[in-house]
Amino acid sequence: MIRARIIGTGSYVPEKVLTNRDLEKILDTSDEWITTRTGIRERHVAADHENTSDLATKAAESALEMAGVNAAELDYIVVGTITGDYPWPATACIVQSNLGAENAGAFDVSAACSGFIYALATAADRIQAGNCKKALVIGAEILTRVVDWKDRNTCVLFGDGAGAVILEAQEGERGILSTHLHADGSQLKLLYQPGFGTRMVPSPENLAKGEHFLQMQGNEVFKVAVRSLSDVAQTALDANGMTVEDVNLLIPHQANIRILEATAKRLNMKDDQVYINVDRFGNTSGATIPIALDEANRSGRINDGDILLFNAFGGGFTWASALLRW
Ligand code: ACO
């Protein structure tokens, strides 16, 4: 059986670090509040000259190098992002050009924090169908440009970054075993960016009202996120006839520590089964899972044959999981 196997990982975060202490100087907040409510201590923030495609390209170059793959070998590039360089065309097309991936089709997937798993699923399905041999899948975001830096309810949560994987078609039992994707658009206003799509155009009035900033009902999101993240992880295990004990490492979307802990508790997972780095990067939306995966991979936390589980929840609402054998 042909499976999509991850043969290289990469990530990139901007140099500039913004700590909770830095935020104390510009907002009515405290390191203590942010740390206890979210587990976040610092986040990386893109420099003015950096765009989402720049972060994505750097992460991709690092993944290509680890995989020993030349960009011209890629058939397919998918970027999960909600903060692309332009409303259109796709950031994936800019990455394709930056890399010189002359043989690759390229497009973006918009599924907010679930964007990386959605992107991974489309590439894995295409590989398993025999239509593609090598694919580049990226999660990349500059969330700090769509948050209102005067809104302490939201701006403290997010950071910028990108992570990437190279997938290759391989015979055997290793690779992506399943993906599950879900959505519920009826609740989109609990977490969304009202402007400036075609529904609310960029006018001086809308700009003055800050309609282009991310808006969120944090309490409501929290409850749905915990339930959906644990349910979709359990769905992945059930679909593969596995239990929580079979999982070597859960790499969840890094939203905040309380969501991570509550989800792990609902799943009966032990602490050492869950990878956490939200303290150093904050919520980088579609980039959290591939950044955490790259860290875990490069630090030797993952061994051949390990069972890895990814789960994510985000705006849309969207939620998703992927189960793989390394
Ligand atoms: N610093 C200090 N005080 C703050 C801050 C801040 N940064 N932000 C909010 N507060 C205040 C509020 O104004 C409120 O004050 P009030 O009681 O005087 O009105 C008080 O803290 C409590 O506010 P709540 O919103 O009830 O705080 P809560 O305990 O729910 O924590 C949080 C807020 C952290 C956002 C929580 O709801 C949460 O984690 N939600 C999930 C949201 C999330 O992770 N979204 C990311 C995208 S979705 C995803 O990735 C899964």
Image (cartoon, rainbow, N blue to C red):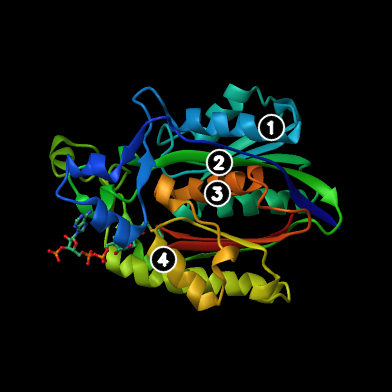
The nearer-to-camera label among 1 and 4 is 4
Q: Position of residue 297 (x, y in %)?
A: 65, 46
- In the rendered image, which quarter contains the N terminus? bottom right
The amino acid type found where label 3 is placed reads Ala
Q: In this orientation, does residue 141 appear?
A: no
Q: CA distance from mark 3 to mark 4?
A: 16 Å
Q: Position of residue 254 (x, y in %)?
A: 46, 55
Chain-order first, disc 3 or disc 2: 2
Element type where label 4 sits in the image: helix
Element type where label 3 sits in the image: helix
Chain-order first, disc 2 or disc 1: 1
Q: CA distance from mark 3 to mark 2?
A: 8 Å
| Most foreground residue, 134 or 257 | 257
Q: CA distance from mark 1 to mark 3?
A: 17 Å
Dot 4 corresponds to which residue? 259
- Residues at discs 3 and 2 in contact (Cβ within 8 Å): yes
Chain-order first, disc 1 or disc 3: 1
Dot 3 corresponds to which residue? 292
Q: Position of residue 23 (x, y in %)?
A: 23, 42
Which label was assigned to residue 183? Answer: none
Residue at left offset 54%, top offset 51%:
289
Dot 2 corresponds to which residue? 163
Chain-order first, disc 4 or disc 2: 2
The nearer-to-camera label among 4 and 2 is 4
Chain-order first, disc 1 or disc 4: 1
